[in-house]
Image: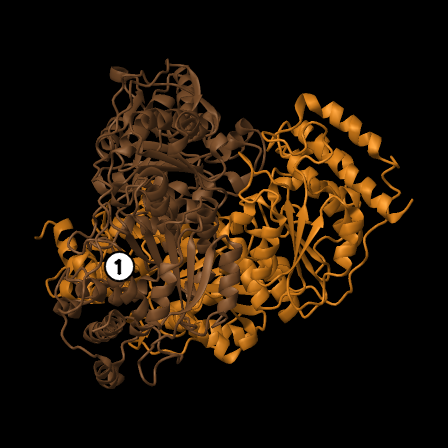
Chain colours: A brown, B orange
């Protein structure tokens, strides 16, 4: 049988299996699979170089299915090349199968979860960046994008990034099947519009009939070597080869039901060879990339270099720590969105330019690229920008958790303490956002020493880590030898055996303010215990419960953040769970702030030392 | 003096005032203003038709400064046309001035806050959509975009949207000044690349020297009538006319300091006329658009049409309510991101196609367009998509709060109860996100009747409203006449005088599960009080405190959401603040879920009726 006939047969088998699997599941997207069948056949049998028996091999080509709802055909492709028996495909979407509705890395051949659309290209770009510039290996990265999702701006951020960095090892395949979920796409079959758009964004763009095996083979052969990412614009039909269904509306996201038998009969009749085992296997990759084990191995080269009382912004300590761990491990990388001179990630670039990726002002792509860089454990990425702008990437971060990424995030310029730039630049929601991410760790260091340790801990911690840093200088309160652990807070002020009247919990600048308030209150014989939680998730429930018991059951939380989702919520949650009697009052930012000097704003919105003094007295009935 | 000379002089005055204001403030972005001076002069003195004395006049042309950090030149322009004295510009960034670091609608001439980059074009597109299709008025919308921010994908989402809807009343001006914050932009002065990109995205694109008044005048004259949005690609220099500073790196976001005097001397010497009052004023608009007062006037035409026990998904009730209020007010509009047949916003489109805007798969633009549609009170927008995908727009939503928007959001398909589609489609962070937004209201209705009332209340509530809806059918539990208020929960199950042993708080599907659990527990003589909070923000602290006092101080929260930021946090926060003794245990989704049947997933992740029964017994020591 000719190679073309083999690939045609495989495409038909992939369609058959997509139909069967979604029929068995009673849900899914068979028509979104059908448009892809020839593309998947050519990619998985002919074009990609990989080891089917070792799906996460570091030297293998990568594949990202950005249109994650076409999962059944991806699963069918891996069954086709022998990773598991075809019969398993009938367990699609069942609770005890890893063949989920959209791909997740529970499957060994999936690097990242997809299913929130438009995210795949950024991730693929991150993989390709690492392949070209860090691994310096021969693997390529293939990403299949739906036409519906190509209206997502993140895709254009990713293309602009990929052409800027000349990622010629990246192939983006647009499956232009004309139909979205609820109506035709914006551009329908205007293939030329896709070509012009991708070309204008710096791709080597080629329009091809996505159902023509010969054309696809030819196009792949001649698409490389342009020093640009490749964009294949494939004209396809949704539900191709499903009689009566192809190119029809109202067939998105549903199994074929009563039409299934007719379609399967039609497809089976197309097969020239009905035996599964007779098809050739893909080419092997060059073995030019070795396994790595990074998480758990990163250390600061020496203790932090500060003296107690030094005035240092935590954002600066972040940059310092990043550059320090970057010097001990050449796989620690920094990524920023044109704020590197404000977040101080520039300190890594200054000493290790090859470990820094400028991602420009495009935060969704910034996060997607970083998640891509972290796949297969190739790097330990630290993403930095203003914390406010990380909200731009919440969907990517949320998906990152499903992708089991070990990517780290540092958000600077939090809260009103940034001052004159005003509310658009003030993160007031970032703790709420990162706390809600499943499996995340949220660091909120309050001085330079603890910030450096937060960076070191984050680098070695599985899952998403977030480090919240501030703009203003703050006094160093810990000695360089102080030890820090995730989930362990510190009592930074107590009258000891003299007894404390009340507990105050702050973070960052508000911890500094709480310590100032403690000085003022002490002159009036009011002792407050001040707690630095260090991590807001997990929070040190034991330390808080002990403090509550020892300080008249009263706690004041103070945070440069909205009242919801931050320190106040975390402390209340921990204490409510304990069941001991307590009152938590919270000082937080309750209205949209405005521009002003940092100290004016801390006062105006009631989170400075004076406000803490007033609140403590009020709670103690001493006004 | 010739018109061109007047406009040149005004440009110089705008530069002078930008320098003076940022000098007085000691911070700000004078160089980012300087590149815009001729553009602003031509726009504000010649091109735009508006009433300087009535900045939010509904008939006037709109102006959006997407590059919000150039605020000083916007303020200088309004001083130039006489809205306030020039001397006020020296209060820039002061705490008692509304001339903030980035524009906010505290100023009467600012419709939306900008400063998180890349958001202006979507907002402007929303304004232009309303102008063309809803107001059917002659006003135009002008949006100035920085080249640094043009890497933000949201801009390309907005351009694709704008050309799809033929928004020929929209003019997007790219200020291509070559330099970003920390280094040159991706495309620097490759004007042709901008032209190709914007043209490929459907704009009528023109490259122009942004410092040449004559060219700008000519280009504006001939840019309309193409049935497309206009993109002016202006070649400019950052810090133009600042000797020694223009086109140099390391001058972003800082006042000129020691160089200020030299620059001001140079600029003053350029002026042909030093008197401020002698310049002409802008043209007046056609008065073809009248004032509206919408919020507070919207009513469901009749009580909800359900019987207790009917099985209705809250997402369906949302669509029904939206179509019902849309029929009573032609300014209630629905916007969706190609999920209208899942969120049921299609029900509005079916009856009122002119009140529905399909925004395709581009959620950042979806939200930006909606915020634009809400400006000047022209419409009451309801944005719907899967709640998980609203995380894509968190930055736009956060900025919407600063913009004082009255935009409403409905997120469907929350939590594991969606079933087989898997974790990428399951919102588990949406309550955390919306609770953290300052001034927001978060509805979590648990049946169809309360959902319809939530929609009605949201339409009439100032600030951002969020309505959380679910996929599965749930029994109607309220009679059509039941009254609902923001911040008022309902006791939906109690043994009354027989006494309740424990309080359970749920929302959506978990309220249904809690009621099932109550039936089971009642057979074992355990009475639980079940509370439907209706709004999670604000939460009914009084009702909760009363319940705690009456039910052994024990509360169980159950939510189809992450443990952080949702019902558990809201309930704990309210009770911790009260200071009464209580224990809150929470059932929530603690790990990344997987695909499966809804009921299997509710069981597996421990939020179904059986899990509630077990947790209640455990809390009561009755295991």
Quadrant location, the N terminus of chain A:
bottom left
Figure check: B72 above or below B121: above
Q: Nearer the viewer, residue B623 or B375?
A: B375
- Residue B517 percent across, percent down from the top left: 18, 63
Q: Secondary structure at mark 1?
A: loop
Residue A614: % across, % down: 45, 28
B109 sits left or right of A339 in the view: right
In the picture, the quarter occupied by the C terminus of chain A is top left
**Residue B47 seen in this snapshot:** yes
Determine the image quadrant of residue B487.
bottom left
Residue extending furthest toward the right: B1
Give the residue drawn at x 35%, y 72%.
A212
Residue position for label 1:
A103
Locate residue A540 relative to residue A232 in the image: left or right.
left
> For this rendering, which residue is in front, B143 or A167?
A167
Residue A208, located in which quarter of the rendered image? bottom left
Q: Residue furthest left?
A: B623
**In the picture provided, is A532 more to the left or to the right than A151?**
left
In which quadrant of the rendered view does residue A501 lie? top left
The percent position of residue A473, horizontal first and vertical second, equals 46, 23
Q: Is residue B582 visible?
A: no
In-front residue for pair A502/B222? B222
Question: Mark 1: few, some, or many residues within 10 Å (few <14, many ≥20)?
Answer: many
A605 is higher (above) or lower (below) than B463: above
Residue B110 horizontal/vertical position (percent): 65, 49
Q: Is residue A306 above or below residue B11?
A: above
């Amino acid at each position: 049988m000719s190679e073309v006939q083999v690939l045609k047969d495989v495409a038909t088998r992939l369609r058959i299996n997509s139909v069967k699997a979604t029929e068995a599941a009673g849900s899914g997207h068979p028509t979104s699979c059908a448009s892809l069948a020839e593309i998947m056949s050519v990619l998985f049998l002919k074009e990609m170089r990989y080891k089917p028996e070792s799906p996460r091999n570091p030297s293998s080509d990568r594949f990202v299915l950005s249109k994650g709802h076409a999962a059944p055909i991806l699963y069918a492709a891996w069954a086709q090349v022998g990773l598991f028996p075809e019969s398993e495909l009938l367990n699609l979407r069942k609770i005890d199968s890893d063949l989920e509705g959209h791909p997740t890395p529970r499957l060994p051949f999936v690097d990242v979860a997809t299913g929130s659309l438009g995210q795949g290209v950024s991730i693929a770009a991150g993989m390709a960046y690492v392949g070209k510039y860090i691994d310096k290996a021969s693997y390529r990265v293939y990403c299949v994008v739906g036409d519906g999702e190509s209206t997502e701006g993140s895709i254009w951020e990713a293309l602009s990034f990929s052409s800027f960095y000349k990622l010629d090892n990246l192939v983006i395949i647009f499956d232009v099947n004309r139909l979205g979920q609820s109506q035709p796409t914006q551009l329908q079959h205007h293939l030329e519009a896709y070509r012009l758009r991708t070309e204008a964004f710096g791709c080597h763009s080629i329009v091809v009939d996505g159902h023509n095996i010969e054309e696809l083979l030819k196009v792949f052969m001649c698409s490389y070597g342009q020093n640009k990412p490749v964009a294949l614009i494939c004209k396809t039909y949704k539900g191709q080869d499903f009689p009566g269904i192809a190119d029809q509306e109202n067939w998105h996201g549903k199994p074929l039901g009563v039409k299934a038998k007719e379609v399967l009969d039609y497809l089976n009749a197309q097969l020239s060879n009905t035996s599964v085992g007779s098809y050739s296997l893909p080419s092997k990759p060059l073995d030019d990339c070795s396994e790595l084990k990074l998480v758990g191995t990163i250390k600061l080269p020496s203790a932090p270099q500060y003296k107690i009382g030094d005035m240092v912004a935590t954002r600066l300590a972040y940059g310092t720590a990043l550059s320090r761990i970057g010097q001990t491990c050449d796989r620690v990388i920094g990524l920023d969105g044109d704020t590197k001179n404000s977040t101080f990630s520039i300190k890594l670039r200054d000493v290790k330019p090859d470990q820094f990726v400028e991602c420009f002002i495009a935060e969704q792509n910034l996060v997607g690229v970083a998640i891509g860089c972290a796949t297969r454990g190739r790097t330990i990425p630290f993403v930095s920008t203003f914390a406010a702008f990380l909200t731009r990437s919440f969907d990517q971060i949320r998906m990152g958790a499903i992708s089991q990424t070990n990517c780290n995030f540092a958000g600077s310029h939090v809260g009103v303490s940034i001052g004159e730039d005003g509310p658009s630049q003030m993160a007031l929601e970032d703790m709420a956002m990162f706390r809600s991410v499943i499996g995340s760790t949220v660091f909120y260091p309050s001085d330079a020493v603890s910030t450096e340790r937060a960076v070191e801990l984050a680098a070695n911690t599985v899952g998403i880590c977030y480090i919240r840093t501030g703009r203003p200088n703050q006094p160093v309160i810990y000695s360089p030898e102080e030890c820090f652990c995730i989930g362990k807070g510190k009592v930074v002020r107590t009258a000891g055996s003299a007894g404390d009247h009340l507990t105050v919990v702050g973070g960052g600048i508000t911890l500094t303010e709480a310590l100032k308030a403690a000085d003022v209150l002490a002159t009036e014989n009011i002792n407050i215990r001040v707690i630095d939680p260090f991590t807001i998730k997990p929070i040190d429930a034991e330390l808080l419960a002990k403090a509550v018991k020892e300080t008249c059951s009263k706690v004041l939380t103070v945070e440069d953040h909205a009242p919801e989702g931050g320190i106040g919520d975390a402390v209340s949650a921990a204490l409510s769970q304990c069941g001991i009697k307590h009152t938590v009052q919270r000082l937080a930012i309750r209205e949209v702030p405005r521009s002003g000097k940092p100290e004016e704003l801390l006062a105006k919105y009631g989170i400075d030392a004076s406000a803490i003094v007033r609140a403590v007295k009020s709670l103690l009935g001493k006004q």
